[in-house]
Amino acid sequence: MSPRDIFIASYRHRLERKLTPEKSLAKVPKDPNAPHAPLNSYMLWSRKIRESSPDEQRRVVGKVLSSIPPSEVVRTLSSKWKTMSEEEKTVRVSFLLLLLLLLLLLLLLSLLLLSLSYYE
C-alpha cells in the first residue's frame, strides 16, 4: 500500500466512526451540577496576580495589567511563568496541598466533635 492509500483508508475509517448513529446516541449529557475540576497551579497563580494591587503587579510582572490588552496580559503572565524556577512553582503547589490538608483536618475534627456530642 502506498502512503496515499493508507491516508485514504484512515480518513474513510475516521468518517465512518463519526457517522455511526450509536456514537451519537452514546453521548451522555453533561451534568450542570457536577463539580468542576480544580484549577492548576498556573491558573491559581495568574488569578492571584490579576487580583493583586497595581504595585504588586508591577513588582512581579513589571507592568500594571489593567493598562494593557487582555491578549498581552496572557502573553506576559505565561512568559513570566515559564521563566520561574520549578522550586517557585512547587512551593505554590505544596502550599495549596497544605491548605487542602488543613481543611480536611478541620472537617474530620468537626465530624469527631459532632459524633462525641451525639453520644452524650
Image (cartoon, grey):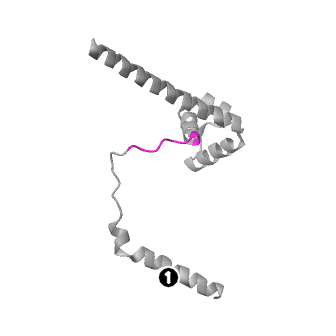
Could you say whether the residue bearing mark 1 is in a helix, strand or loop? Answer: helix
Nearest to the observer: residue 48 or residue 31: 31
Other residues around mark 1 within 10 Å, as few (<14) / some (14–19) / many (≥20): few
Give the image quarter of residue 111.
top left
Residue drawn at x 54%, y 79% is 10
**Is 52 situated above or below 28?**
above
Q: Amino acid at mark 1?
A: Arg
Q: Is residue 67 left or right of residue 84?
A: left
Give the image quarter of residue 33.
top left
Whether residue 62 is in magenta: the answer is no
Residue 109 screen position, x and y as percent: 41, 20
Whether residue 38 is in magenta: the answer is yes
Quadrant location, the N terminus: bottom right
The answer to whether residue 48 shows anywhere in this view is yes
The answer to whether residue 53 shows anywhere in this view is no
Residue 13 screen position, x and y as percent: 49, 79
Q: Is residue 22 left or right of residue 7?
A: left
Give the image quarter of residue 112.
top left
Task: List the single residue furthest toward the top.
Answer: 120
Residue 50 screen position, x and y as percent: 55, 36
Label the magenta part by its dominant secondary structure. loop
Q: Is residue 103 left or right of residue 46?
A: left
Residue drawn at x 62%, y 86% is 4
Residue drawn at x 66%, y 33% is 60
**Is 4 situated above or below 106?**
below
Nearest to the observer: residue 81 or residue 93: 93
Nearest to the observer: residue 111 or residue 89: 111
Q: Which residue is mark 1?
A: 12
Task: Tally the numbered discs.
Answer: 1
Q: Which residues are magenta?
A: 35-42
